[in-house]
């Protein structure tokens, strides 16, 4: 199974954001609670945590304005912890 990780809506006014730093690399295993990237919005830079367990891939490019809901990455073998 492949699950998409999307740009979260981090405030009511947020329409776009940009990934300014990836804390993981393609092919790396991620687990719930990992801060996978830093997203910059008009209000500042915010760590984005993941809630999946799997292998990350297809990372969005850095410094590109992306709308809320845009795909930031994929997670292969994803399962939701809980």
Image (spheres, grey):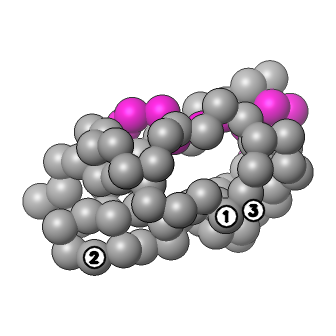
Q: Secondary structure at mark 2?
A: strand
Q: Earlier in the sequence, mark 3 or mark 2?
A: 3
Task: Name the residue that disc number 2 marks.
Answer: 44
Which quarter of the image is occupied by the N terminus? top right
- Distance Cα–Cα, label 1 vs label 3: 14 Å
Q: Which residue is mark 3?
A: 32
Which residue is painted at 72% across and 35% down in the image? 57
In the picture, the disc for residue 7 is: none
Residue, disc 1: 23
As drawn, the residue found furthest toward the left would be 13
Looking at the rendered image, the quarter that the C terminus falls into is bottom right
The kind of secondary structure element at disc 1 is loop
Measure how far apart labels 1 and 2 are at the Cα level: 17 Å
User: Mark 3 falls on what kind of element?
Assistant: loop
| Front position in the image: 61 or 74 | 61
- Residue 61, position as x, y percentages in the image: 49, 40
**Res. 82 visible in picture:** no
Give residue 64's position: percent from left, percent from top. 34, 43
| Disc 3 and disc 2 in contact, CB within 8 angstroms | no
How many C-alpha atoms fall within 10 Å of the one at disc 1: few (<14), some, or many (≥20)? few
Mark 2 neighbour density, 10 Å: few (under 14) some (14–19) many (20 or more): few
Q: Does label 1 or label 3 sit earlier along the sequence?
A: 1
Is 60 in the magenta? no
Q: Is residue 2 above or below residue 12?
A: above
Q: Which residues are magenta?
A: 69-81
In-image side of 72 versus 31 (left or right): left
- The percent position of residue 17, horizontal first and vertical second, equals 29, 53
Q: Specify which label sits upstream in the sequence, 1 or 2.
A: 1
């Amino acid at each position: 199974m492949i699950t998409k990780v999307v740009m979260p809506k981090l405030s009511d006014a947020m329409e776009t954001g940009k990934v300014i730093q990836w804390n993981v690399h393609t092919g790396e295993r991620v687990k719930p609670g990992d801060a996978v990237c830093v997203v910059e919005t008009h209000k500042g830079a915010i760590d984005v945590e993941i809630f999946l367990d799997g292998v990350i891939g297809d990372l969005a490019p850095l410094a590109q304005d992306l709308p809320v809901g845009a795909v930031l990455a994929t997670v292969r073998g994803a399962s939701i912890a809980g």
